[in-house]
Each structure stands twice: as C-alpha cells, then as structure tokens.
Image: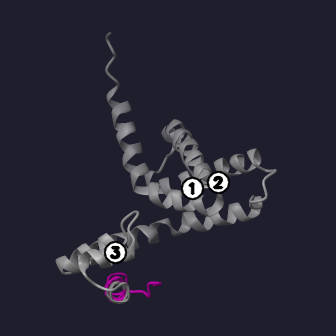
Amino acid sequence: MNVPNPHPNQIDLNTGFLRLWTQQEQALRALIRSCVPRSSEVDEVMQSVSVVAWQKFPTLNDPAKFGAWVAMIARYEVLMARRRVARGRLVLDEDVIAKLVEEGAQEMPLRHRQLDALDGCVAKLPEERRKLALAAYGPGVSMKDLAAQLGRTEGSLYQLIARIRQELCACMEKALGEEVPV
C-alpha cells in the first residue's frame, strides 16, 4: 500500500503542535484536575482537549500564546464534561470553572519556571541526597519500605527528607528570587 508523503508544511505543523503540547501538558492536566473531580474524567477531558487543539492548531496565530489558547479549549471541554455529568453531586459551577481556568492559564509560565528551577536544584544535590529525594517521591513508594531498605527508622528518614526539601526550597528561592511555598 502506498501512503502519500505528507506535505512539508504538515510535518512542521505537527512538530510545532507536539512541541508546544508537551511543554504545556503537565500544567494543563493540573488545571483540568482542579476542575474535574474524577481522574478518569480528567483523562477524557485531556483527550478531548488534545484532539480539538490539534484540529484547530492551524488557526493559532501566535505560538507564544499556546498555553492560554489551549487553556481556553480546556475550559470549554471541562464545561461540556460538566454538562454530561450535571446530575452528579461533585459538579463545580461554571463560573468557578471559568475562574480556575483563567487563573491556571495565567500561572502556567510561573509553574514552568518553578519546575525548571526545581530540576536545576535537584541536579545540584549531592548524588546520595538526590537519589534519596527522587526515590522518596517515586510512584508507589512507601516511606516504611524505603526506611527499611536504607536501614533507618521512618522518623529519621522523614527528618532527612524534610532537610532535603528545605535545601531545595532555599535553592529555588535563590533561583527564582521569590519565596517558594513548602
């Protein structure tokens, strides 16, 4: 079967969309999660947002505004999801959703700067502390099991993790020039 080669502009369009989407995906998921009560619904809304954004991407005039643009698409998709489950008890008012999306879109650049600063600060930790911090916050990790693996008490492990978090927070404050919530 012969599959026609895509037009070069189509390749650039797809690459551009994917680059921008992956930059915003985590923040967008957090934004949607703040508006939708169930994680399964978050996945459905994210999928709908990605399809609509991909279809409408050629109409975006300024790629620098992709975050706000895709947040607006998310707002409408959240509202549509809300209408589908409007009989449920855990449904936010449309005005609340609009406010959450607006604030979330405004905070996306800050969240990206914070994540970049955190990555830099984690990289500056001594290797053992870095590995411990990453292990402690890994998926499905139990502090009890981690403490047993390290031959420490849970209490001493919690204290060490707290000190590492304080180091990271101080590093991020320095990097960002602002106070970082712990």
Give neighbour class at mark 1: few <14, some 14-19, many 20+ (Cα, 10 Å): many
Name the residue that disc number 3 marks.
118
Name the residue that disc number 1 marks.
71
- Residue 128 in the image: state x and y as whole percent: 19, 78
The amino acid on which the numbered mark 1 sits, given as a three-letter code, is Ala
Is any atom of residue 168 visible in this view? yes
Residue drawn at x 36%, y 66% is: 138
Magenta residues, start to end: 162-182
Where, by quadrant of the figure, is residue 157 drawn?
bottom left
Q: Are marks 2 and 3 in contact (CB under 8 Å)?
A: no
Relative height, residue 70 to residue 110 (above, below) = above
* Residue in the foreground of this view, choosing between 100 and 82: 82
- Name the colouring of the figure: one colour
- Residue 141 in the image: state x and y as whole percent: 38, 68
Relative height, residue 48 to residue 147 (above, below) = above
The amino acid on which the numbered mark 2 sits, given as a three-letter code, is Arg
Q: Secondary structure at mark 2?
A: helix
* Secondary structure, magenta segment, majority class: helix
Q: Would residue 133 be found to the left or right of residue 181 on screen?
A: left
Name the residue that disc number 2 marks.
75
Q: Secondary structure at mark 3?
A: helix
Numbered-mark total: 3
Closer mark to the observer between disc 2 and disc 3: 3
- Residue 173 in the image: state x and y as whole percent: 37, 86
